[in-house]
Image (tube, rainbow, N blue to C red):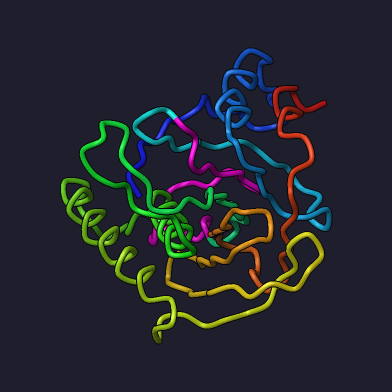
Amino acid sequence: METTSRVGAQAPAAEDGPPVHSARRTVDGYLLAPFPWYGLDEAFTGPRRLMQVGTAADGTVEHGSIGHGDEPSIKNEGSGDDAKERFAVVVTVAENPVRRSPDGTGFMEATSVSSAAWLAGVGLLSFTWPGHMDHSLRDDWLDQQTETAWVLADDLTGPAWSTLSLPVDGVPTPFHYRESEFGWVLAGSTSEGVHVGAYGRGMSAYGLGFAKIKDIGAYAHPAG
């Protein structure tokens, strides 16, 4: 999937009262998406936040993430504090068939459940930092782990994955699921023409449910 990431201004922690202009700038990319966004359902009552959207070369929004719970931070294996961190991030990916690239010279890869699984896997890696590793080696480590995430996402029926059923808009839906030392990743599809991926730590994936966000524009307003 040929996309480029556009990182919106990350809202500060809810208790700090995110500035209105910052939240509105962040939500603009989400409002441009031609597909519905998904997050955890109403059973989750904790804080929610916009994270980032990904766009195609022509600027079309193709995927994005909604954070739930604690602000994810880099996991340090040498600290016990990260064990207390509880978060889940839901990734929505537009369902796109194989299509011609904007410059007309080739074709862009179709999106699939594997796309959602890969984006979720890479998302989890972005908040992972083996504490024993020298910082100068982090780029090489990330490259290797990103490639591994792609290989795993391309083989959802392989031994690295199990299956579980979770509600999506109240309907039991099959998901591919895997765990690692850094957290968990899952991916599935909806009846709304999008694929849903998710990753997290400290929150059990088995108790989650997903639902279409009724008004993504509400994220433009600061929390009370």
Using residue 184 as the reference point, say whether residue 208 is left or right of it: right
Q: Nearer the viewer, residue 52 or 139?
A: 52
In the image, what residue occupies the spot 39% across and 68% down? 153
In the image, what residue occupies the spot 58% across and 43% down? 71
Using residue 146 as the reference point, say whether residue 99 is left or right of it: right
Q: Nearer the viewer, residue 99 or 151?
A: 99
- The answer to whether residue 7 is above or below residue 166 is above
Rendering coords of residue 147 (x, y %): 25, 61
- The answer to whether residue 36 is above or below residue 161 is above
Span shown in magenta: 60-82
Toward the bottom, the furthest residue is 159
In the image, what residue occupies the spot 55% across and 27% down? 29
Q: Nearer the viewer, residue 146 or 110?
A: 110
Rendering coords of residue 51 (x, y %): 55, 37
In the image, what residue occupies the spot 69% across and 72% down? 173
Q: Is residue 73 in the magenta section?
A: yes
Quarter of the view holding residue 180 = bottom left
- The answer to whether residue 220 is above or below residue 57 is above
Q: Is residue 219 in the magenta section?
A: no
Using residue 1 as the reference point, say whether residue 209 is left or right of it: right
Rendering coords of residue 142 (x, y %): 26, 54
Quarter of the view holding residue 215 = top right
Pick the quarter of the image with the C terminus: top right
